[in-house]
Structures are given as structure tokens and as C-alpha cells.
Image: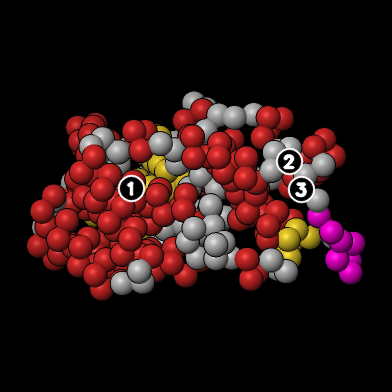
Amino acid sequence: MNMRAEGSSVQFSIAAVERDTGLGKDTLRVWERRYGFPKPTRDAYDERTYPLDQVEKLRVIKRLLNAGLRPGKIVPLELSELLALSAQQNTPSQNIQTHDAHQNLLNYMDLLRQHAPEDLRNSLSQALVHMGLAAFINQVVAPLTQMVGESWMRGELAVFEEHLFTECITGVLRGVLNDLIDTRPHGTPTVLLTTFAQEPHGLGLLMAECMFALHGARCVSLGTQMPLQDIAHAVLAHQAHIVALSFSANMNPKQVLSGLMELRQLLTPQVQIWAGGRNPVLQRREQSHALVLNDLDHIGGALEQWRQAH
């Protein structure tokens, strides 16, 4: 059963759809003319509005675009056909190396669906103690976050269940992060962590903060959705050497590129910008304004190179 069916009467503005799916307004209008989808209605001010079922379909389309499929092939398809394509794009062999690791992730998903947050937190905490922080983030948190996002996109998880998962993971990581701050000496560089104003997802940022702290950096986290001017002011206030930014797959690629360019202009050349996350534009285009870290494991090596250079 689709857990979000009850919200089918909800209408979204074109700005809300752009923010929620990462698809630009111009793209939505072009698809409307070229493919007959989406099919917005008009509100009292003659502005486009989109029902929830169309927004959900657009989310699936965005994910398939990130996987390399072309709009002309997928936009005209029905949602069931898109979901079948999405399942083909995300077989366990792509992200899970062993059967045991895959089964562990499925067990965590079962606890989430059973609405057992205490058991989920305890299981995650035990895995953290057993594996160590770096392996826990790379082998559990990152693939499990992807699995939860895909299940939500297919309507298999409700919004509250996705939020419950985020809170459980955040609690576990915050606990170990506080221990790191309390027990380990922190030196340079000072790393300012945040996201752009259009990016509300913060779990990737928290994973990065844990990896930075693990490798001895001094971390200053501003949380999510920070305006560019405020990022620049915070860099001065905290004398930061590096600005670390996280970009989810849902953020509009144009906003990623324009934001990186504008932020680069606001900072002195000595302050580096490091970018990570699953936004496809980071992998598809050479970045002149930021160092792109395609994997959380690369943070340690990048910090070592920074220290050698300074």
C-alpha cells in the first residue's frame, strides 16, 4: 500500500516541486509541452500547481536521470514502469559487497518498518562498536540511507518513517561525535560544514563531520540551508580553512554550480571549498571552484594533503 495515498489532494507550487525534486522550473515547463507530463492545474492566481502523485513520479524520474537515462525515454512512462526501471538500476550487487552485509541492512529496514526505534538504535550502536566509526559510516550508514530513500520514493515508507530513521542515525552519530570532540585533540584545519539554502538534507553532512573529526580536523557545523553570504561571514568569524558542503541528488544541478561559483567569489583564495554527496553534477562536470570528494573515505587523504601543503 502507498503510505502517502491520503495526501493525494495536496497541491504543490512549481517552486515547491523544483525544491522537492531538484528539477528546474524551465525543465518542468519544457516537459509539459514536449511530453504532456507533468500536467499541472492552475490556482486562483493562474499559477501552476502539481498534485502529490505527479510530484512522486517526478522524484522517480529524477533518480533515473541521475542514473544516466534520457528524458525522452522515461518521462512518458507510467509510474509502474518507472518503478520497474528504478528497481533494475538498484540491484544489491551495485552497493552491497556481501550477502551478510546486505542481510544486515534488511534487518535494520525491518526494525524501521516495525516502528521499533529503540531496537534500531541499539542494533546500530552495536554495529558501530563492532566495526569502528569509518567502516560503520561507509558500510552501514551510507548504503542504508540510500536504501531508505529508495523505499520512500517507491511509496514503501511513510514520511514519518524516513524521519524516524534519520533521527535514529543522527542520535547514534552525534553520540560518537561528542566522544571524539571530548577525548581527541583537534588541530588544523578548521572545517566549516554546511549546505546551501536550497539543500535541506543534513545526514550526509553529519557523516562527513564524523570523518573530519576522526581525522583530527576542528569541525564547525552550521547545519543545513545556509545563505552564501552567511557562509562567508562564518568563515571569517571562525577563521576556517575549508568549507565542506554536502549536495544530495535532489538539489538542482544549476543551483549547485552557480552556488559554488558565487561562494568562491565571496571567499579569499586561501579558503578551500570541498564538495561531496550524490548530486550527479559533481561527477559529470570538472569543478574549478571546489575539490570534489566522491567518497567519504577520501576525506582522510585530502586532509593529509592539505596539511602537507600548509
Q: Position of residue 77 (x, y in %)?
A: 70, 38
> Does dot 3 land on a helix, a strand or a loop?
loop
| Foreground pick, 229 / 221 | 221
Q: Quadrant of the N terminus?
A: bottom right
Sequence-first disc among 3 and 2: 2
Residue where numbered disc 2 is placed = 27
Crowd around label 2: few <14 · some 14–19 · many ≥20 (10 Å): few
What residue is pinned by disc 1?
142
- Residue type, label 2: Thr
Quadrant containing the C terminus is top left
Q: Main secondary structure of the magenta part?
A: loop
Q: Amino acid at mark 3?
A: Pro
Estimate the spatial distance between the alpha carbons at disc 3 and disc 1, rounded to whole Å: 32 Å
Which secondary structure lies at badge 1? helix
Which residue is at the far front? Answer: 1
From the viewer's perspective, is the residue at label 3 or at label 1 nearer?
A: 3
In the image, the segment drawn in magenta is 40-46
In the image, residue 249 sits, relative to residue 127, either above or below, namely above
What residue is shown at x 51% (from left), y 44% (from top)?
249
Q: Relative to residue 149, is residue 210 drawn left or right?
A: left
Q: Residue at x 49, y 34 (%)?
A: 88
Compare marks 2 and 1 and give the one earlier in the sequence.
2
